[in-house]
């Protein structure tokens, strides 16, 4: 199990691109933090999460 | 009343903020990226507080549709926002070093344009541009602080707008969900609440107080 934005989710072995797609997030509108480090966009495909990881998605909506 | 001297205004601010905070504010440099509803309010707060250098960046001109929430005057419609806000900031704080860049920020120019600023404020309106700036700063300029915003549209509760600390250098303000694309537009009061959160967090960071 991993944690995504504080909630336990069974996503072990998936890459970040797949998790974002599953959750309906656009890659162009997020910042991704894995275990308190920012994941560069070019590494979303190759970064695979495993048991105990803490993932945080920051989602940007329009307006300012 | 004549315009105060640099020393008079500095001492007056220091009396209110404390000598140590005022010294830190006067030595700080903040880039405000996007000077619409969020950024124009943020820049004004920072100028009033006595931030030494404010770097305002926007490519747009003042439009009639901005008057509902952005800190521009009717007579400024048609001017570049950087020119219009420069004039306003100088009226508030003649001795503030206001730098302007009338340009569209993108991944290719962000590192160069923002290289001399300590704290980066993301105050765009477009979601893709917000994410592009935040990711670029976090990836390529890890020494900078960035204070961003997401979710302040509509007439929902002002209390839903919060400041969150994501990493030691990355803060985000807003309710995280109320999207201008969902229908209700941007209302001056709620945009100002979010701008207030951002400006306040920036001032706290300048004071080396990193808790939200």
Image: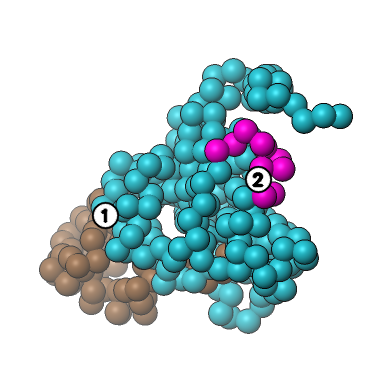
Packing grade of label 1 (10 A; few <14, some 14-19, many >=20) is some
Residue at image location 48% in from the left, 43% down from the top? B30
Residue under label 1: B139
Q: In screen coordinates, is A25 left or right of B33?
A: left
Foreground residue among B115 and B148: B115
Q: Position of residue B163 (x, y in %)?
A: 52, 49
Q: CA distance from mark 1 to mark 2?
A: 31 Å
Query: Is residue B196 in view?
Result: no
Which of these two is toward me, B136 or B52?
Answer: B52
Q: Dividing the image into 4 quarters, which one contains the N terminus of chain B?
A: top right
Identify the subunit bearing mark 2: B
Q: Identify the residue under disc 2.
A: B89
The local secondary structure at tag 1 comes to helix
Q: Badge 1 sits on which subunit?
A: B
| Contact check, label 1 and label 2, Cβ < 8 Å | no
SS at badge 2: helix
Residue B6, percent across and down?
Answer: 66, 25
Q: Could you tell me residue B78's position as x and y percent?
A: 67, 70
Q: Colour of chain A?
A: brown
Q: Decide: is A24 above or below B34.
A: below
Q: Colour of chain B?
A: cyan
The part of the image, by quadrant, that contains residue B96 is top right
Write down the region rendered in magenta: B87-97
Q: Residue B91 magenta-drawn?
A: yes
Q: Residue at x 72, y 63 (%)?
A: B76
Q: Which mark is residue B114?
A: none
Q: Residue at x 29, y 48 (%)?
A: B141
Does residue B77 appear anywhere in the picture? yes
In the image, residue B100 above or below residue B59 = above
Q: From the top left corner, tell me how far across and down residue B63 is, in percent.
A: 67, 72
| Marked residue nearer the N-terminal end (1 or 2) | 2
């Amino acid at each position: 199990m991993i944690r995504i934005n504080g909630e336990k989710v069974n996503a072990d072995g998936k890459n970040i691109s797949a998790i974002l797609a599953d959750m309906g997030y656009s890659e162009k509108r997020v910042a991704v933090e894995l275990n308190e480090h920012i994941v560069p966009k070019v590494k979303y495909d190759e970064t695979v999460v495993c048991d105990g990881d803490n993932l945080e998605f920051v989602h940007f909506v329009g307006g300012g | 009343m004549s315009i105060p001297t640099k020393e008079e205004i500095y001492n007056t601010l220091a009396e209110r903020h404390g000598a140590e905070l005022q010294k830190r504010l006067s030595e700080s440099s903040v880039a405000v990226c996007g000077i619409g509803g969020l950024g124009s309010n943020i820049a004004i707060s920072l100028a009033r507080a006595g931030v030494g250098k404010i770097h305002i960046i926007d490519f747009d001109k003042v439009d009639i549709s901005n008057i509902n929430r952005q800190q521009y005057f009717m007579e400024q419609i048609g001017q570049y926002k950087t020119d219009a806000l420069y004039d306003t900031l100088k009226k508030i704080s003649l001795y503030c070093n206001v730098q302007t860049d009338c340009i569209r920020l993108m991944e290719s120019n962000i590192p160069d344009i923002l290289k001399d600023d300590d704290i980066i404020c993301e105050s765009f309106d477009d979601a893709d541009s917000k994410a592009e700036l935040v990711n670029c700063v976090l990836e390529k300029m890890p020494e900078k602080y960035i204070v961003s915003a997401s979710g302040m549209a509509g007439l929902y509760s002002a209390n839903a707008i919060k400041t969150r600390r994501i990493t030691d250098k990355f803060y985000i303000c807003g309710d995280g969900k109320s999207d201008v694309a969902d229908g209700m537009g941007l209302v001056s009061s709620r945009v100002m609440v979010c701008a207030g959160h951002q400006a306040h967090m920036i001032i706290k960071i300048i004071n080396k107080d990193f808790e939200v």
